[in-house]
Image: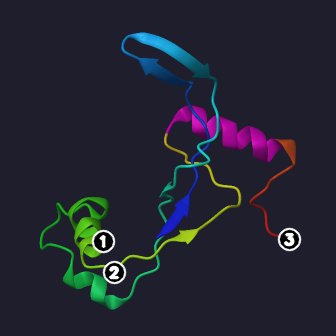
Amino acid sequence: MTAVRPHGRFGALEIDGDKVSSFAEKKDNADVWVNGGFFVVNSGVFDYIPDGDEAVFEEETLHKLVRDDQVLAHKHTGFWRCMDTLKDKNDLNEIWNSGNVPWRMR
């Protein structure tokens, strides 16, 4: 599994009771690793996937693999962004159009 640090998307709050004690606008999550969505697997993974068309890899299958100590993480520290929303798409297109494309291989 590729592990990545997500780009800060939202302002972070620290709350004590109902009082906001600090606010930091869109900080990168330096202490958080998330599933970057890229996997390298061997054929044994098929033993973990339930029958039927309703299986979602990141739900039941991945949890079983983790439980059985079958998942290693590659910590990718280079450029990574998700593209889940129109805003994500527009932001990535803006980077592309700038000509300073961190994911381009030369």
Residue highlighted by disc 2: 70
Residue at x 17% of width, y 60% of height: 54
Q: What is the C-alpha distance between the residues marked 2 and 3?
A: 34 Å
Q: Please state if 22 lies on the left or on the right of 104 as rendered.
A: left
Q: Position of residue 88 (x, y in %)?
A: 59, 38
Residue highlighted by disc 1: 66
- Magenta region, residue range: 85-97
Query: Which amino acid does the dot numbered 3 rest on?
Result: Arg
Q: Are marks 2 and 1 in contact (CB under 8 Å)?
A: yes
Residue highlighted by disc 3: 106
Mark 1 residue element: helix
Going from N to C along the chain, the mark reached first, 3 or 1, is 1
The front one of 78 and 103 is 78
The front one of 69 and 49 is 69
Q: What is the C-alpha distance between the residues marked 2 and 1?
A: 6 Å
Query: Secondary structure of the magenta portion, mostly?
Result: helix
Mark 3 residue element: loop
Q: Is residue 104 above or below residue 28?
A: below
Q: Position of residue 45 (x, y in %)?
A: 29, 82
Query: Which amino acid does the dot numbered 1 rest on?
Result: Val
